[in-house]
Amino acid sequence: MAELPVNPQQNRLQGQVGSMAFTLATSLPGIHSAAVEKGELVVRTVRDQLLPLMTLLRDDPRYRFEQLMDLCGVDFPGREERFEVVYNLLSVSHNHRIRVIVTTDETTPVPSVHHLWPCATWWERECYDLFGVLFSGQPDLRRILTDIGFEGFPLRKDFPLTGYEEVRYDVELRKVVKEPVSLTQDFRDFDFVSPWEGMLTLPGDEKAHEVRQGIKRSRG
């Protein structure tokens, strides 16, 4: 089997990512781990060191992660700090990506990074709306996807799959109202007759066909 050609540029990028992981793991406080996982650089840190780390990653010429591509939550209900807040950063200058992860619980806020990347406001609002994660220093921490008056956090693993109330805007009352959920189903007329009943009578099966159709044969 022929070996695949070596891509020098890819090897160079992988070497740079590995070197970056070693530097971050050994030179910064509060880093639990920094390693290449499935080809991607993943850094796990503590909440108190999140802002210094993010500032370094954005401003240091060695890293230059100019863009926050995504911020999302992950729920692990069995853990003491059940939520992971995941930041996906992109360096346009160096063509690198990095994933930064911190953990928290239902009541402890995570420092907001909106002053580093203004787009973080949208992502932090979404994470708060769907998981209930709080972000300290975020001036606009409102729900962004769910309806007005919605209670609970839909992407938590313990969020009920069915509820007892629905929230909607009543045009006549001009306000949001809550009503009991009605899951009524239209009446369905199930036809349990075998599909074979619709077939034409096969040769030699005339008697059975007459019995099925209730036809009385005249006897001479």
Image (cartoon, grey):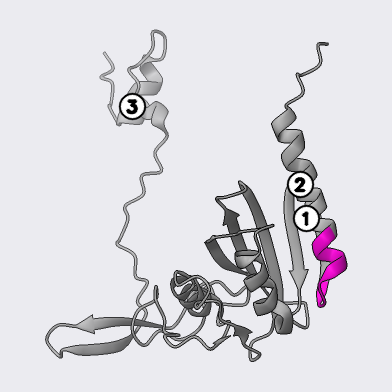
In the picture, residue 65 is in which quadrant? bottom right
| Element at label 2 | helix
Q: Which residue matches tag 1?
A: 20
In the image, 70 versus 107, the foreground residue is 70
The disc labelled 3 sits on which kind of residue? Gly
Residue type, numbered disc 2: Gln
Q: Which residue is mark 3?
A: 198
Horizontal relation, residue 76 to residue 212: left or right: right
CB-based contact (under 8 Å), mark 1 and mark 3? no
Graded by Cα atoms within 10 Å as few (under 14), some (14 to 19) or many (20 or more), the crowding at tag 2 reads some
Looking at the image, residue 124 lies above or below residue 209: below
Q: Are marks 2 and 1 in contact (CB under 8 Å)?
A: yes
Question: How far across and how far down the image is residue 64, in percent?
Answer: 61, 59
Magenta stretch contains residue 28 = yes
The magenta span reads 23-31
Disc 3 and disc 2 in contact, CB within 8 angstroms: no
Label 1 element class: helix
Q: Residue furthest right?
A: 26
